[in-house]
Image (cartoon, grey):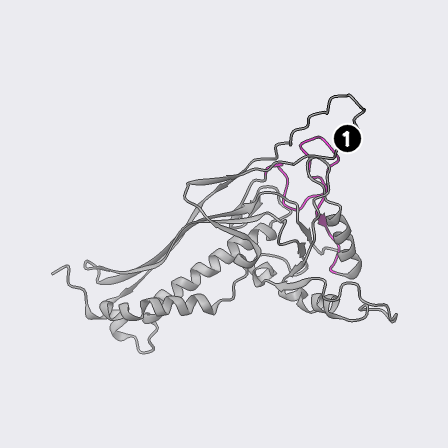
Amino acid sequence: MASLRPAWVDALDPTFRELFDVAEKQIPTKRESIFHTDPSSKNIEKDSSASGLSTLVDVAEGQPIPNEDPDQGYDVTYTHIKKALRSGVSQEAWDDDQQNVMTRRPRDLAKAKIRTLEKFAADILNYGTTAGGGGTAPFTSGDGKALFATDHPRTDGGTAQGNADTADLAEDSIETALVAMRATVDNKGQLTFVQPKVLLVPPALEKEANILIGSILRPGTANNDTNPYQGKFQVVVWDYLSAAAGGSDSAWYLYDPETHRLQYFNRTDKGVTGPTWNDENETAYWKISVRASVGFSDWRGIWGSTGAN
């Protein structure tokens, strides 16, 4: 008789996928639009880079042409982390439920997954000034520095570079970030042609960001100068960067979607599975489990400011 499940468990199956789909659409997500997202078929993923070559040199007539090789970049390892949750409903709870709360259990698990993965990715930025990462997303960079640092080393021993600031979100601080990002060089000292296009902020800075980017004239001044940043950047607001989600209400970020190396690897994501029936305690269980990793393969292409000033 153990193979016979109560009718209420089977009755959930026709709505199971619908509940799951609806749940995933109810929480706005930003992770996949910000991070480069790729599947993974291995227990870990490794990234590295090569610098390319520098510039041509003058060669006198009859002299041999010098040879140059690319510089190997820093290696980065992504280690997948398993995140899972299970939830059960007893026969009695199902029988006595008057508000259809129990039928929403698969949907609640689906929501929990979305919340988890959003925060997982956001914590790369929330702890972007901490070497080794933090929060739900520990990560060790190739150069041993935090994502946002003022002294990122070069493999060729050249002058260190920075992509970090403490300035509030304002016209002057955007200018500082823009100029520095355009001057970013690779490990051979060659320009990487970073073109920042996205201003990423928490909800507390949404108004300020839209004023800075949307105004026709320069904001906060009586001058009638044209606003040089009008429409220059796309403003993206991510709730999981807020203080309420473990981030900061003052931090802001500028990045180039094409050159930044924020990375997310999806190892396994089977969605919600179940229900499975435990005859011993007359309880049905659903579970959800994912394995993924998140981090950054290089610091170039993104600028971060704590907004502490």
Quadrant in which the N terminus is drawn? bottom left
Which amino acid is tagged 1?
Val
Identify the residue at the far front of this view: 62
Give the side of residue 100 with respect to residue 121, left or right. left
281 displayed left or right of 117 = left
Horizontal side of residue 82 vs 236, given as left or right: left
Measuring from the top left, give residue 7's x and y in whole percent.
Answer: 20, 70
Q: Quadrant of residue 278?
A: bottom left
Q: Quadrant of the C terminus?
A: bottom right
Q: Which residue is mark 1?
A: 57
10 in relation to 276, above or below: below
The answer to which image quadrant residue 241 occupies is bottom right
Nearer to me, 192 or 229: 192
Q: Classify residue 252 as left or right of residue 21.
A: right
Extent of the magenta region: 142-169
Mark count: 1
Is residue 53 one of those drawn in magenta? no
Dominant secondary structure (helix, strand or loop) of the stretch shown in magenta: loop
- Horizontal and vertical percent for residue 301? 66, 49
Magenta region includes residue 166: yes
User: Badge 1: few (under 14), some or many (20 or more) residues near its Cα, within 10 Å?
Assistant: few
* Residue 127 horizontal/vertical position (percent): 60, 49
Which sits in the foreground, 4 or 278?
4
